[in-house]
Image: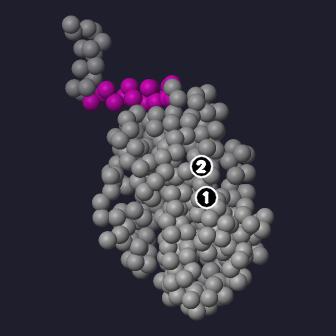
C-alpha cells in the first residue's frame, strides 16, 4: 500500500532532497546506548582513554556508553569486530597506530582495511614511551643497556603487548645495533607484570601501563622516547641523547565503521571533542603525560596517512615484517 509518507520519501529521494532529513535525525543522536570497542585489554593506555571518553560522553548525552575489550592478534580481533559493526554510529572504535598504521606493513593480510573499513572521527592523545628494565638487570642508562646487549647478544629479552611497544624496541635494536630477543604478549600490562617478576629484561612501554611501576620502584626507568625531556619527568633522559635520531610516539584515536552517515560522524566528533575538554580527561592526560590532539575527521585521516608512511619505513628498517 502506497501511503502519503512513502510517496513523499520517494519523491525526496528522486530529487536528492532526502539527505536533508539526515541532519535532523543526527540532532537526536544518540537515542540508545553506544558501545566502544577497544582492541587491547583493561589497563592499557587505549582502554584507559576509551573509558574516560565513555564516561564523559555518557554524561553529555545521558546514554550509557559501554566498553568492549577485544584484545589479541595485535588489535586485529577488535578491529575486525568494529569494521563489521553496523554503520549507525552506535559502535565506536578507539584504537592506536598498531591497527591503523603498523599492521598493514607487518602482516601480509588483515581481516580489515585500516582505511576502507573505517570513517575517522577524532584524534585523542599522543604519548611517548618509557624504557624500562627489571630491577635485577645491572643497567641504569641506555648506554649501559647497549653495552650489556653487545656483550651478551641475543640473551636479553624485551616484551611487547602492542605494535608501538614492539616497534619502539625493534627500532632501538636497529639504530643501536644490538640483538634483543622479542617476547610477544596479549596486552601491555601482562608484559609489565612479567618485567616486574624478572621474567623479561626490557620494555618500551606507554606511560599508562608502565610508568606507575617505575615511579614506585617495581621496575627501573632509564629513558623516554620523546625527542626532548618531558616536563615533570626530567630525571629520565631521552633515548635520543645516546642514540641520535631516535624518537617514538604512540597515539589513540576514535573511528566508526565505514559508511556511517557524515552527520552522525560530525555529531560524534563534537561529542568527543567536548568530552576532551572535561577536567577529568585533562587530568588523565596530565597524569599520563599525554598530549590531546583533537581535530576534524579530515585531519585524523591525514595524520593516519602520514603515520602509515612513517611506520612503513620503521617496519622495514627494524625487520618487523611477518614471514
Q: In what element is the residue under mark 1?
A: helix
Choose between 263 and 243: the one closer to the eye: 243
Who's the residue at 67% across and 66% down the image? Answer: 197
Who's the residue at 40% across and 33% down the image? Answer: 88
Q: In what element is the residue under mark 2?
A: loop
Q: Which residue is mark 1?
A: 189
Q: Which mark is residue 302?
A: none
Queried whether the magenta region covers residue 37, the answer comes back as no
Queried whether the magenta region covers residue 22, the answer comes back as yes
Can the viewer see residue 248 in this picture? no
Q: Which residue is mark 2?
A: 42
Say whether disc 2 or disc 1 marks the residue closer to the N-terminus: 2
In the rendered image, which quarter is residue 187 located in?
Answer: bottom right
The answer to whether residue 33 is above or below residue 214 is above
Q: Bounds of the magenta span?
A: 16-31
Give the quadrant of the N terminus. Answer: top left
Task: Name the main secondary structure of what is drawn in magenta.
Answer: helix
In the rendered image, which quarter is residue 310 located in?
Answer: bottom left
Here the colouring is: one colour
Who's the residue at 75% across and 70% down the image? Answer: 233
Choose between 302 and 229: the one closer to the eye: 229
Can the viewer see residue 5 in this picture? yes
Who's the residue at 78% across and 64% down the image? Answer: 216
Horizontal arrangement in the rendering, residue 249 relative to residue 323 (left or right): right
Do the numbered discs 2 and 1 sit on residues whose CB atoms are within 8 Å?
yes
Amino acid at each position: 500500500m502506497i501511503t502519503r509518507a512513502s510517496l513523499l520519501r520517494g519523491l525526496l529521494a528522486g530529487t536528492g532532497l532526502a539527505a536533508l532529513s539526515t541532519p535532523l535525525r543526527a540532532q537526536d543522536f544518540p537515542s540508545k546506548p553506544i558501545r566502544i570497542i577497544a582492541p587491547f585489554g583493561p589497563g592499557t593506555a587505549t582502554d584507559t582513554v576509551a573509558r574516560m571518553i565513555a564516561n564523559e560522553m555518557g554524561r553529555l548525552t545521558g546514554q550509557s556508553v559501554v566498553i568492549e575489550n577485544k584484545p589479541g592478534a595485535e588489535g586485529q580481533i577488535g578491529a575486525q569486530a568494529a569494521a563489521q559493526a553496523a554503520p549507525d554510529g552506535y559502535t565506536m572504535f578507539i584504537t592506536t597506530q598498531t591497527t591503523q598504521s603498523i599492521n598493514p606493513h607487518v602482516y601480509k593480510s588483515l581481516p580489515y582495511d585500516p582505511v576502507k573499513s573505517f570513517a575517522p572521527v577524532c584524534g585523542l592523545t599522543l604519548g611517548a614511551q618509557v624504557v624500562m628494565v627489571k630491577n635485577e638487570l645491572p643497567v641504569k642508562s641506555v648506554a649501559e643497556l647497549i653495552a650489556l646487549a653487545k656483550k651478551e647478544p641475543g640473551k636479553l629479552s624485551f616484551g611487547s603487548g602492542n605494535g608501538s611497544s614492539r616497534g619502539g624496541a625493534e627500532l632501538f635494536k636497529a639504530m643501536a645495533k644490538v640483538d634483543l630477543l622479542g617476547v610477544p604478549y596479549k596486552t601491555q600490562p601482562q608484559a609489565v607484570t612479567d618485567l616486574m617478576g624478572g621474567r623479561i629484561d626490557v620494555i618500551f612501554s606507554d606511560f599508562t601501563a608502565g610508568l606507575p611501576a617505575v615511579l614506585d620502584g617495581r621496575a627501573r626507568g632509564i629513558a623516554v622516547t620523546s625527542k626532548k625531556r618531558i616536563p615533570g619527568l626530567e630525571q629520565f633522559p631521552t633515548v635520543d641523547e645516546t642514540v641520535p635520531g631516535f624518537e617514538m610516539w604512540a597515539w589513540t584515536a576514535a573511528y566508526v565503521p565505514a559508511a556511517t552517515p557524515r552527520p552522525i560522524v560530525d555529531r560524534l566528533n563534537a561529542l568527543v571533542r567536548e568530552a576532551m575538554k572535561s577536567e577529568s580527561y585533562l587530568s588523565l592526560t596530565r597524569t599520563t603525560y599525554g598530549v590531546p590532539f583533537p581535530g576534524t575527521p579530515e585531519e585524523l585521516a591525514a595524520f593516519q596517512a602520514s603515520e602509515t608512511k612513517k611506520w612503513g619505513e620503521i617496519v622495514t628498517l627494524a625487520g618487523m615484517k611477518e614471514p
